[in-house]
Image (cartoon, rainbow, N blue to C red):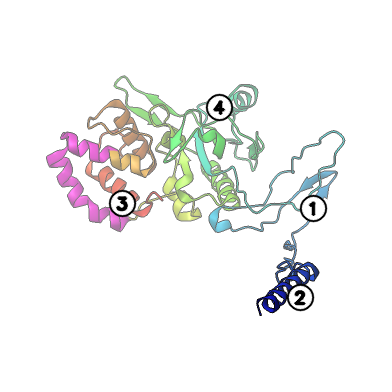
Amino acid sequence: MRKTLYIIGLSSLVFSCTSQKNVKKSTYKPRTSTSQAKTTVKPAPTEKNKPEVATEHGVEFFRTNIADITKNDNTISYGSIVSAKPAGYKVVKTHFPAIGQNFRQKYLILHYTVLPDDKSIEVLTQQSVSAHYLVNNLGDNEIYQLVDENKRSYHAGVSAWRSDKNLNDTSIGIEIVNMGYRADATGVKTFESFSDDQIKKVAALAKDIVVRYNIPATNVLAHADIAPTRKQDPGPLFPWKKLYDEYQIGMWYDEMTKQNFITLAQSDIDTKYNEPSFIFIVQTALQKFGYDILPNGTWDDATKKTIEALQYHFRPQNYSGVLDAETWAILQSLNQKYPTK
């Protein structure tokens, strides 16, 4: 019996070992999908049909606006297109122009020359000072262009308005032939008036410029506005209100709003005039409107000249540089109408 069991066990072991040798090892293979993933092909961006660049006598121009003028993003060119000419390569305008751009010309600044016609031309063309345009006083229909609008002219000097400085970089300058002012022994200034012909020229020229470059009313300024401690031009006899009323150029306050401020303004002048806190408020209001002034609570020379510049522009009946109720009411109404954005 034991021998029989031994033989059966041995036979089972031999069969098991033989079976193990004949069985192939199996490895795990993950199941793969028989269908391949689809590749998403994005269509190439299609550019809008843009007007072509015009060529005149070998000079290229682009004069069609394809951008949003309400944002002052403009692609119009009012001069020839200046392009690089790299050696061995060709610059093409297949995708010209890009929408992301705007004009250099953000401001229009008005001046007087303090020189007669012939001398004004000489100085503005032969010396380091210049302007884009010169309006003569000859009674003709000519306006002299002295500098390309796409270039900087040297008319503003050290200057600032609101958040911008060095306004030569961002402005067009108009010089008007005018002898400026004479000061008497007490320092009182008497200004020379402008002729009707000059004002018509200035108005037509300014209108053309502000429309083409979408220049806002707050950026049509006097040289005195952007440099009040050193400049007076174009002075109190320049008719800013006429330009505003008849040509919709520049800023002016609303009479009704001014009248709403006048009673409280008179009270401020009568009771608070020399209080540092009130002076600081006035200086802050001047700064808020756009003038480059540092509030310090004192009626210093810079503050007087800044008030004087405001009066030249908006209160020409009194340009003493002393704050009166009318000037204070005008300043407050201007800040209400033209808030800083």
Cβ atoms under marks 2 and 4 closer than 8 Å: no
* 55 sits left or right of 280 in the view: right
Q: Spatial distance from mark 1 to mark 4, Cα to Cα?
A: 50 Å
Residue on which disc 2 sits: 35
Q: Mark 1 belongs to which amino acid? A: Thr
Q: Mark 4 belongs to which amino acid? A: Pro
Q: Residue 32, can we see it?
A: no
Q: Secondary structure at mark 4?
A: loop
Dot placed on the residue nearer the N-terminal end, 1 or 2:
2
The location of residue 181, given as percent across then percent down, is: 42, 28
Q: Spatial distance from mark 1 to mark 2, Cα to Cα?
A: 42 Å
Question: Which of these two is toward me, 249 or 339?
Answer: 339
Q: Secondary structure at mark 2?
A: loop
In this view, the mark in front (1 or 2): 2
Q: Spatial distance from mark 2 to mark 4, Cα to Cα?
A: 89 Å
Residue on which disc 4 sits: 116
In this view, the mark in front (2 or 4): 2
Residue on which disc 1 sits: 94
In this view, which residue lies farthest toward the left?
271
Within 10 angstroms of label 4, few (less than 14), some, or many (20 or more) residues? some
Dot placed on the residue nearer the N-terminal end, 3 or 1:
1
Residue on which disc 3 sits: 333
Magenta region: which residues? 255-283
Relative height, residue 255 to residue 112 (above, below): below
Kindly identify the residue that appears in the image at 48 percent across and 45 percent down: 219
Q: Residue 277, can we see it?
A: yes
Q: Mark 2 belongs to which amino acid? A: Ser
In this view, the mark in front (4 or 3): 3
* 204 sits left or right of 238 in the view: right
Quadrant placement of the N terminus? bottom right
